[in-house]
Image (cartoon, helix red, strand yellow):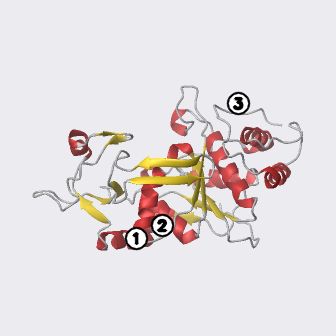
Amino acid sequence: MTATPERITRADNHVGRFAPTPSGPLHAGSLLAAVISWLDARSTDGRWHLRIDDIDAPRVRPGAVDAIFHALEAFALVWDGPVTWQSQRGPAYQRALDTLLTTNQAFPCGCTRKDLAANGRPGWEGPIYPGTCRHGLPPGREPRAVRARATTRYWTIADRFLGAVAFDLEALGSDFVIRRADGIVAYQLATVVDDLDLGVTRVVRGIDLLGSTPRQAQVYQALGATPPAYAHHPVLVAPGGDKLAKATGAEGIRADTARRQLADTLTVIGLPPSDPDTPDAPEALLAEALAGLRKQGLPRRLPSVSGLPAPPDAV
């Protein structure tokens, strides 16, 4: 399928994006993220880009990209400009990696996960890197991954939804991987390079990615660049309490019930349709939501989200 992006000139002062991984179709949780991000950009007449995070080839599932395109179009979530494909961005990532290595903001690391588990102190998200290779590879070790130096330990991020959030990058793991041992560029570097090249000024994403923010701020600092404004929203959870995802049984959203699913999602966000049973198309529902958003703004603290109603039958 060939996607047809919107051909409308929009303001460049606010630029957002949506970046799904094509490991399967979009589900209710990814729809929530897409709608919040789209509304945030469009409410200021800003641009909204689509990036396909397909850099990790083993996770990509056949047909998933077309399913994502179909879903976004069915829900009237039209994007600006051409689609960005991470799998085609290798040279840009390598240039950034070379810059960080040359400026001593990153270093080769020969540690395995077993080494880290054995020698790292417990941290918030797993073992803390003990600095084994920070000042050079120990004798007998070969480089495997590349790590960014956590040169600034304490960060305070002014999150647009959560307010000021403080982080201890040491407790989050200290020096972090930006190129994996299998040669794949890690999320923390790839997303920074992509957002810089797209001119992204606002990142709206799930709160499950909150811990990535100081790491990415460290990469921005190392590259001499200014990070975007961040806003982290609640995520949908599965019955067992884990984040709703394909791995926890999330079903793909359905184009034939787009109106009802979109109405439910807007209600969760706090912008319910004036008539929940309206037969209006998704475009009309989004237009109404935008009108309300321009008057009241997105809630600074979105409501806690435990789930959406089950997908309705076709209407």
Residue drawn 58% across the image and 26% down it: 239
Frontmost residue, 222 versus 114:
222
Q: Position of residue 234 (x, y in %)?
A: 61, 40
Pointers 2 and 1 in contact (CB under 8 A)? Answer: yes
Q: Which of the two marks, 3 or 1, is nearer to us in this view?
A: 1
Q: CA distance from mark 3 to mark 1?
A: 44 Å
Find residue 193 and name its label.
Answer: 2
Q: Quadrant of residue 278?
A: top right
Q: Which of the two marks, 2 or 3, is nearer to us in this view?
A: 2
Q: Residues within 10 Å of mark 3 (few under 14, many from 20)?
A: few
Of the numbered discs 3 and 1, the one sitting upstream in the chain is: 1
Frontmost residue, 62 versus 111:
111
Residue drawn 53% across the image and 71% down it: 197
> Could you say whether the residue bearing mark 1 is in a helix, strand or loop?
helix
Residue drawn 60% across the image and 39% down it: 235
The residue indicated by pointer 1 is 96
Q: Position of residue 247 (x, y in %)?
A: 51, 36
Q: Amino acid at mark 3?
A: Ala
The residue indicated by pointer 3 is 310
Q: Is residue 49 visible?
A: no
Quarter of the N terminus within the rendering? bottom right
Quarter of the C terminus within the rendering? top right
Q: Amino acid at mark 2?
A: Val
